[in-house]
Image (cartoon, rainbow, N blue to C red):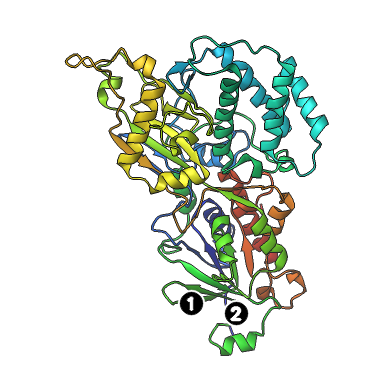
Amino acid sequence: MVSKKPRIVIIGAGMAGLAAANKLYKSTNSNQLFELSVVEGGTRIGGRINSSEFCGDRIELGATWIHGIQGSPVYKIAQESALLHSHQPWERMDGFFSHKPITVAEGGYELNPSFVQPISTLFKNLRNFIEGKPVDGDGVSSEIVKHCWTNCGPGNLSVGSFLRQGLEAYWSFVKDQKPVDGVGNWSRKSLEEAVFAMHERAHKAFSAVDDLGTLDYNAESEYEIFPGEEITIAGGYSGVIESLASVLPVGTIQLGRIVEKFEWQPDGCSQELRSDNGDDGRPVKLHFCDGSTVSVDHVIVTVSLGVLKRGIHQDCNMFIPPLPSPKIQAISRLGYGLVDKVFLQLPSQYQETSSFKFPPLQMVFHPPDSELRDPKIPKWMRAASSLYPIYSNSRVVLSWFAGQEALEVESLSDEEIANGFSTTVSNLLSSKSQDESDEDSGEGKQLKFDKVLRSEWGSDPLFFGSYSYVAVGSSGDDIDALAEPLPENSSNLDSPRSQLQVLFAGEATHRTHYSTTHGAYLSGIREANRLLKHYNCDVM
């Protein structure tokens, strides 16, 4: 009787899934050891990588940055695939800010950099300390960081509580509370707090959290990025995905196939029994939404943590039987958040014929309990920290949203978004735009936006969000538990095909590089290597 090849199915054609498929295929294509396929629920490959175009510019609706080019596998692929240069303009082609941003406070007050800088330095130093990085040589900030650590201790501390302790300590150390000229009804302390809150909102978008109080302090020091410059990809992030997929034979990737259930065998299986049931002697059965099934020896699950969180609920039961308790607890404890981007196009006159050039903005708002808040500015708009051209003199501007406000933005119409931005920016830039008056009526112009494009990761049922974080109450140990294959102690099972039935990859399974594309890539390589080693293949 001829022995059948081990059948491996990878769920998800994002970075992790295609990295695993690429590795398995290139490592064994000479002897064709495996029967390999990639199953993707969507209509495209890439997962949370989705390069697009907006008003003639290349933009990223999902993953945007290569976080450090030295040693990054993503940078290496982009370099080898000639993706680092383009004749077409692309998002952040000249770095994060091509010009220094201006900081504007609600009511139309541009803040002097000498006022903003101490608070910005304080926030940066607090963040650096949390992340285990050197603290800048600012005497006051250094003393505040030491004071906070001495007085709070590690415990079950959150990033949010540590940052706020730093701000309170700042007010204790810095006695200068003289009024600030030219800022209307803002007091010095309220303005300092509002600038600090602006940085907190930016960090929420970076970390994909709804509240920094849910972000675990201790885990931040484990997080790693590669050294060197952080860049965007001129040819589009999707080019990296296409490069990984290009080596796979036609038909390996199957689009539009959503897996509904994973049926696996915790204690191995009786090969005879499974064969009698028409399952070809393979221990795992995949049930698709269209009613079809396929039996496999090994499945690499690369779905998002958001999908796994939905999948462990009793009314869903994605896994039959349910996952072991340690894995369910890890999935439950780990954080998974939402970040969305909103792109808007300025009318041509603002960048071409008008004397007014749109600057990179850092936006400072009154706190929620203030009576000075402009009621015309939408609540969701106050969750944004910045708005800036995607490159120097571009008519396309970009803002980021996180958490519940991001989900709210997904539910709005393009007109509602454009109007919200128009009202807000007109308020913030009122002092600058007063010169732009209508010659006929003499009335000041309100800044308008022509077009809107936003990502919608929260409402997409294939993702339910953007990326993971370590929440208070969880730890890097939960990431490791999520990454463990099933069945537990599978090496005790007799048949190699009953071992390593369900493997897990994706950014949420990498302890030090979670939330990144390179973390997703490395996790896919890790699981491919696990299977190659299992079948005594050379692992390079």
Identify which residue, 408 or 49, lies in the foreground. Answer: 408
The residue lying at 46 percent from left, 49 percent from top is: 457
Quadrant in the picture for residue 209: top right
Q: From the image, tell me which residue sits under label 1.
A: 293
Residue type, numbered disc 1: Thr
> Dot 1: within a 10 Å radius of its alpha carbon, few (fewer than 14), some, or many (20 or more) residues?
some
The residue lying at 38 percent from left, 26 percent from top is: 425
Identify which residue, 537 or 335, lies in the foreground. Answer: 335
For residue 3, the mark is 2
Percent across and percent down for residue 170 are 70, 21
> Dot 2: within a 10 Å radius of its alpha carbon, few (fewer than 14), some, or many (20 or more) residues?
few
The answer to whether 16 is drawn above or below residue 163 in the figure is below
Callout 1: SS: strand
Callout 2: SS: loop
Pointer 2 or 1: first along the chain: 2
Percent across and percent down for residue 3 are 60, 79
The residue lying at 46 percent from left, 63 percent from top is: 252
Asked if one can make out residue 250 in the rendered structure from this viewpoint, the answer is yes
Quarter of the image where the N terminus is located: bottom right
Percent across and percent down for residue 165 are 71, 30
The residue lying at 19 percent from left, 17 percent from top is: 441
